[in-house]
Image (cartoon, helix red, strand yellow):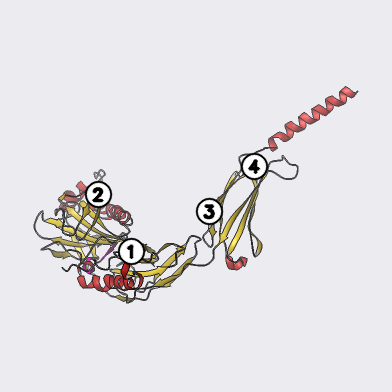
Amino acid sequence: MKKFFYIVLLVLIVGGFIYVYPEIEWSSPKIDIKLESENIGTRPFDIEVSDEGKGLKNVSVVLSGAHGESILVNKNYPEGIKGDKITVKLDPKKLGVKGGPAELKVSAEDRSRLKIFSGNKTKINQKVNLDLVPPKLDVISTDQYINHGGSGFVVYKTSPDTIKSGVTLGDYFFPGYKGNFKDEDVHMAFFAYPHDVDPGESITIVAQDQAGNEKTVGLIYILRDVNYRESDINISENFVENIMVPLMDEDSSGLDHKEIFLKVNNEMRKKNDATIKKTGSKSEKKIMWEGAFRQLSNSKVEANFADERTYILNDEPIDKQYHLGYDLAVTKRYPIEAANGGIVVYADELGIYGNTVMIDHGMGLLTLYGHMSTIDVEVGDSVSKDDIIGRTGETGLAAGDHLHYGIYINGVAVRPIEWWDKKWIKDNVSAKINQASGEFNSQDTGTQTQKNSIDSKSE
Ligand SMILES: [Zn+2]
């Protein structure tokens, strides 16, 4: 009888175990708090939770500090969820939290039945510093006259906790650069007022700290109207056959003239402009140029900046594009001078622009030279103003030998004429740097800034 009892007991235990075993697991949930630093503020951050076994049941995130405890997240999961990425965003006002030391308490529970009433639990407490104070930001430079389609320049000072700053205008962001003054917190930023952005857009200087707190200051400026021309360009079928077809990187058979034209003038142009934008958005942190930028010697401007061109094929308007540079012509295979000092960042074929050189002049400023017959420089070469970088030609989408010359700020095309103008540079760039140098660079350090260099050479 006793023996029978033990057998029954054993069966019950084994049977129960077999029944329960699939519901049990010993691996606890994993928690990964994705913080860039211990400073947290209004910048959202992610918490990744996962459970290898039965899946997640509940995740909670509590912020504990001088204000008490607030629940930031309390999330229950249906069966079968093995992982989740939770984005946490603090709303300091709503939570009534103040700055200072605090703790993030994250806990995750899984669906294991190892314990009778609850699953495996993982808890992580992470010390954080609540930073809810935006950086300080003072605009130092004054007098902003900006030409529509032209360039702007601003000098400003932030508090040392700033990790990112610059100028925003519509969807555009132009980064500021520091390290050019004895006072490390003084920044400079070149920016563009793009020709296709409507007048009246607000220009904002923005500084952001590690915790994501942001300070913005609106820039007061006067926008000068610029008349841009519109023109019609008649396209011959010969041009499509002889200039455009060879440019295509795909088979053109089966496409009519209009389709070929759009593949090159529209699709390829977009791709090429994206390459320019990408090349122009990486730049040296210092100014590498001085004096006015050079116009190709002895050249005449044949086509203007931001001309709106309507392309007509067999009496049908088929495309519209802006011409984002100047066309400069002298004689065939004319030597091209570097417009100013800098580093060659592109020296290769570039679709509609043909053989192309791009020179980075620092702080986002870039010049582009297109349709070249030969390129005499390589990526990484340092060039000075007037160094010969190659010769004019008619490679790419060009009818006749000329240089396509573009100036870009952070990949956005701007009117080159301002950069050719010594007075414009003096009024809009050097005067502002000099003013800031007087204020933030003491005389006895000998620290070289652009103070003496930018407008020292006359054209
Ligand atoms: Zn051109």
Spatial CA span between label 4 and label 2: 53 Å
Number of residues whose C-alpha sits closer than 10 Å to that of mark 2, classed few (under 14), some (14–19) or many (20 or more): some
Nearest the viewer among 15 and 229 is: 15
Q: Earlier in the sequence, mark 3 or mark 2?
A: 3
Residue linked to disc 4: 28
Whether residue 417 is in magenta: the answer is yes
Residue linked to disc 1: 180
Spatial CA span between label 4 and label 3: 22 Å
Q: Nearer the viewer, mark 4 or mark 3?
A: 3
Disc 3 residue type (three-letter) = Leu
Q: Quadrant of residue 141?
A: bottom left
Residue 178 x/y as whole percent? 36, 63
Residue linked to disc 3: 35
Q: Nearer the viewer, mark 2 or mark 1?
A: 1
Spatial CA span between label 4 and label 1: 52 Å
Residue 396 x/y as whole percent? 19, 52
Nearest the viewer among 300 and 396 is: 300
The residue at the far right in this view is 1
Q: Nearer the viewer, mark 3 or mark 1?
A: 1
- Work out whether 430 lies above or below 45: below
Residue linked to disc 2: 379
Disc 1 residue type (three-letter) = Asn
Q: Quadrant of residue 206?
A: bottom left
Magenta stretch in the rendered image? 412-418
Q: Earlier in the sequence, mark 4 or mark 3?
A: 4
Judged from the image, the secondary structure of the residue bearing numbered disc 1 is loop
